[in-house]
Amino acid sequence: MVFVLIFWVLIWLLGIAATIFFCLRQWILRHKKKLHCPESENRLHVGIFHPYCNAGGGGERVLWCAVRALQTYKWVSCCSETILVNSTWTENHIVDLLNVPLKTHRVYPPCDIEHLKSLEHIENNEEILIVSVGQFRPEKNHPLQLQVLYELRTLLARDEALWNRIKLVIVGSCRHEDDYERLHNMEDLAKHLSLENSVEFKVNVKYDDLLNIYKRAKIGIHTMCDEHFGIGIVECMAAGIIMIAHRSGGPLLDIIETSEGSQNGYLATEAVEYAASVLNIILNSAETNKSIVYAARSSVERFSEKEFDDQFLRAISPLFV
């Protein structure tokens, strides 16, 4: 008797759940139709995605919370009129998840490249400055940067004078105690590798101080795997810094070109490969490096604020028809 009662209770609950699901689906479909019916012609519905959260790194974290929700409630995507993504890497994932390529528009994040392109490099023959810019988050893979410097020292074992001119400046922000602990671990690792005299950590620096570092830096490294876009890479390129980024994600698909004749930077994966690229840049002729810098500064025009405005308006224009 008890089992029969439980059985009918379960049937009743399933019936209620199915009814709620059906009613919700019908409501969404009716609401979508209202957006296109004559009586709503004077009403405009616009959704804005704001990439921010208090934890830092908000764009990526919020985006993938949204993707996770879409994986669970994929049918809701039928109500989307247009979908904006920030890179080819993200676009491929969204199209794969939702299968709506015609609604998906790639709009690169805006960067204040004009100001950065106007920066004049400060020559210093006594110093070769390598810069890294990024939050002290685990996915940024800062330990790899110290491994790169360790490998570079090995490559320069017979040229101590050149090695002594090289310094890595790691610029980053710390959001909370976990980030500060990661920073302290990095400092300990630098000492363990006997690199403490060749590495400088700068935390939560002011923007003007960052610009001064850009003016002095010759080389930039970025070690995150599958970075969705990489606006920090774009900023360094605009500032005239030759970038070495991870061969994946946005840097590979959207930002850095390594083909001969159009090279605007370098791509690497392992520490030895990064170190070899750094040494190549150091040993390159001035003319070769100038051509890379020129190509880089020209290529980042695609990521200007004006280009963002144009592409954003193009992507949302169907909403106004």
Image (cartoon, grey):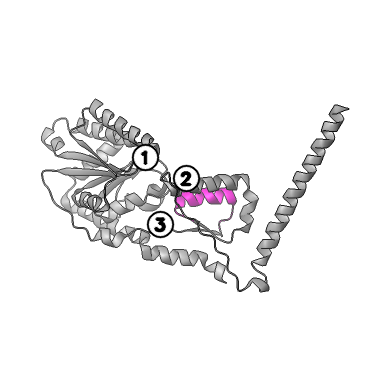
Q: Is residue 170 visible?
A: yes
Identity of the amino acid at label 3? Pro
Q: In percent of the image, x 60 and y 74: which residue is there?
A: 42
Along the viewing direction, whichever of 271 and 170 lies nearer the viewer? 170
Q: Nearer the viewer, mark 2 or mark 1?
A: 2
Q: Secondary structure at mark 2?
A: helix
Q: Which residues are magenta?
A: 85-101
* C-alpha gap between disc 2 and disc 3: 16 Å
* C-alpha gap between disc 1 and disc 3: 19 Å
Identity of the amino acid at label 1? Lys
Along the viewing direction, whichever of 75 and 284 lies nearer the viewer? 75
Residue 80, horizontal then vertical, whole percent: 59, 58
Q: Secondary structure at mark 1?
A: helix
Identity of the amino acid at label 2? Arg
**310 displayed left or right of 191:** right
**40 displayed left or right of 317:** right
Q: Where does label 3 land, which residue?
A: 109
Q: Where does label 1 land, which residue?
A: 140
Q: Where does label 2 land, which residue?
A: 61
Mark 1 surroundings within 10 Å by alpha-carbon count, few (fewer than 14), some (14 through 19), many (20 or more): some
Residue 153 belongs to the span the image colors magenta: no
Quadrant of image for the C terminus: bottom right
Residue 93 belongs to the span the image colors magenta: yes
**249 displayed left or right of 79:** left
* Mark 2 / mark 1, whichever is N-terminal: 2
Along the viewing direction, whichever of 262 and 101 lies nearer the viewer? 101
Q: In percent of the image, x 58 and y 46: which residue is there?
A: 69
